[in-house]
Image (spheres, rainbow, N blue to C red):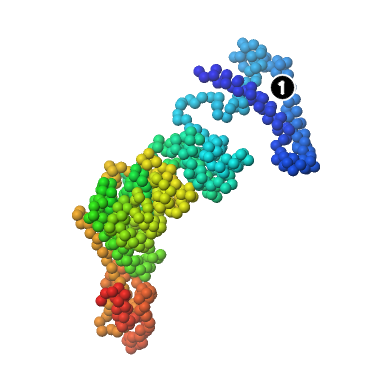
Amino acid sequence: MRTPKYTAKALWYAVPGLFRTLGRLLHWAAAEEGNWALRQHAADRNDPEVWLKLDKQRQRQSRWRVSVVTALAGLALVALLVLLLADVPGLVRSLLPLLAGLPDWALRLLVLTPAVPVLARVGRPADAPITDRVSEGPRYRKLTAELVRRALLSCGIAGINSAVAKDQHAISFPNDIHRDGPGHLAIVDLPYGVEASDVIARRGRLASAMRLPLDQVWPEPGTGHPGRLALWVGYEPASQMKQPAWPLLREGQVDVFKPFPFATTPRMETVYAELMFRNWLDGGQPGSGKTFALRLKVLAAALDPRAELRIYELKGVGDFKVLEPVCTEYGNGFDDETLARCAGMIKWLYQECQRRSKRISHYAALGKAPENKVTPELASLKGSGLHPLIVAIDELQELMLSKYGKEAGEILEKVIKLARALGIILLIGTQIPDKDSLPTGITRNVNTRYCLSVADQTANDMILGTSMYKQGYRATVFQPVVEAGWGILSGLGKPAARRSYYVNSQDAEHVVARAMKLRGLAGTLPETDTQTRQDAPVFDVLSDLANIWPAGENAAWNEALCARLIELRPDFYTGWKSEQLTTALKPYGVSVGDIGRRIDGKAVTRRGIRFDDLTEAVAERNRRNGTD
């Protein structure tokens, strides 16, 4: 049905294709492009001698090319004479009897048919294919270098416009524009002195120049130097691209020591985030999706049955209410009682850090905490007091601006500095990131930040860090509600635009149900109405040595003491030998020396300690701690 149409189009484009082919052959034969730049440079310097030498070189190269073109022209002339004078129609009739009824002129033209599609391919415009689509699917605008240049010139950046006016190649492309996921990626080297952040700040103008929606154009700083731009343009707007469901929505378990799926890139690639050894700060204006991003991390933590959850949402609407069954402590509201409980929890956290630091020292002496940090093995060890503790506080500004705020802020800053290595993970959310509602001591010490839509540069830098706005990382480009969930994620590799997975309240209930089942099997499901802050067991080697010291002895060998310690607390002291005990006593200043004994009439000397040294160390420790 479409053959006549395609035939007409091919014949139409074959004519300019013929002339274009002849033009290219003549241009090639002239060898003008070989050293054109050098000849032009010599002409600009008014150096005729060099120009003549270069032109002679061009002429030598042109001679053999002209010979080739002349030979091809001769062959074409001979072929044309054969076509016109020889008995070509008779040859065609003998080879193709079905065409015997056609006149001679038609058969002569038929011989030229194979050349028509070739010439048509050369002669057609680059964006006008000869054949049509068989089925009409979505049409995407192809990203080209010319389109990118035009868009950059439309941004109104003086450095770009003036540079291109002097040199049309001031905007260059170190790599070819290529397909990257559901879109195209262009790596652009901007003119000298222009930074990628200058273009990113004009994302709206860039999208306007491309005649595309804002959420289809994603400029980011490129790698290499500040003047390199990575421009990714999707096939369709991000708002129309269906984000995949959260991979943990229906199945799966989480290990807080390992990354979990948290967000997607504009290309819809999964971004993995980490919880252990990190403190998070999520910030954004109302409607930015901040609370849902914060809740997503808590949902992930709930799928690790070892993790203890303590949550305070100070907005009072119950966004985290679904998680209450798996929380050891939960508070909702901004009334004085809830704020007081939240402040009390922060005080308790500081005490918990002190207790955990002693436990880390204890296990380090055992060789079970090689980097003086909580390990997966210690977190799984029942009774260790080092299980993962996740504390989430949403709308922190409500606490900071209350009468409890000053003291709570000072303590929280200390906790953030200490908590990472101790298995305590802080997740903070706020919508008013200023120095009063979010103390700078807190923002300076968090190591993972997620800045969703904010209104201005000050809020942007309060969350992401100083000068991040100037570097091109600007959450001000995201629109609240319309682009909810989009933000700049910093601290997990290179900062970039990401969209956290969306899990609604109904789906969150299913996740919590799975978490409850996991915790029920592990024996870590909190009992209803038993929200308490139990102190973790605190043991220290000095007190334990005093408890198991052999009666009536003024000195004892390390190996004998280790045996008694293991008997006292096998979970903690199993594996201790004389060397471990010596290491554990060193911070307290207890001297370990040679202790002599007579066994079976023979003198035996081994390493040990004296009771007087032990009692003196205990007394000194109590004096420092202010206890008797």
**At label 1, which amino acid type do we have?**
Ala
Asked if residue 408 is positioned above or below residue 299 in the image, the reply reads below
Residue 607 shown left or right of residue 152 in the figure: left
Total labels: the figure holds 1
Q: Nearer the viewer, residue 552 or 147?
A: 147
* Residue 274 % position (x, y): 39, 53
Residue 35 shown left or right of residue 205 in the figure: right
Q: Which residue does the image show at 20% across and 53% down from the upper left?
A: 528
Examine the image and state in which quarter residue 504 appears. Answer: top left
Asked if residue 188 is positioned above or below residue 128 in the image, the reply reads below
* Placement of the C terminus among the 4 image quadrants: bottom left
Q: Nearer the viewer, residue 292 or 126?
A: 292
* Residue 491 % position (x, y): 43, 53
Residue 232 shown left or right of residue 282 in the figure: right
Q: Is residue 233 visible?
A: no
* Residue 254 % position (x, y): 34, 51
Residue for badge 1: 79
Q: Which residue does the image show at 40% across and 53% down from the upper left?
A: 462
Q: Which residue does the image show at 70% across and 18% down from the upper left?
A: 83
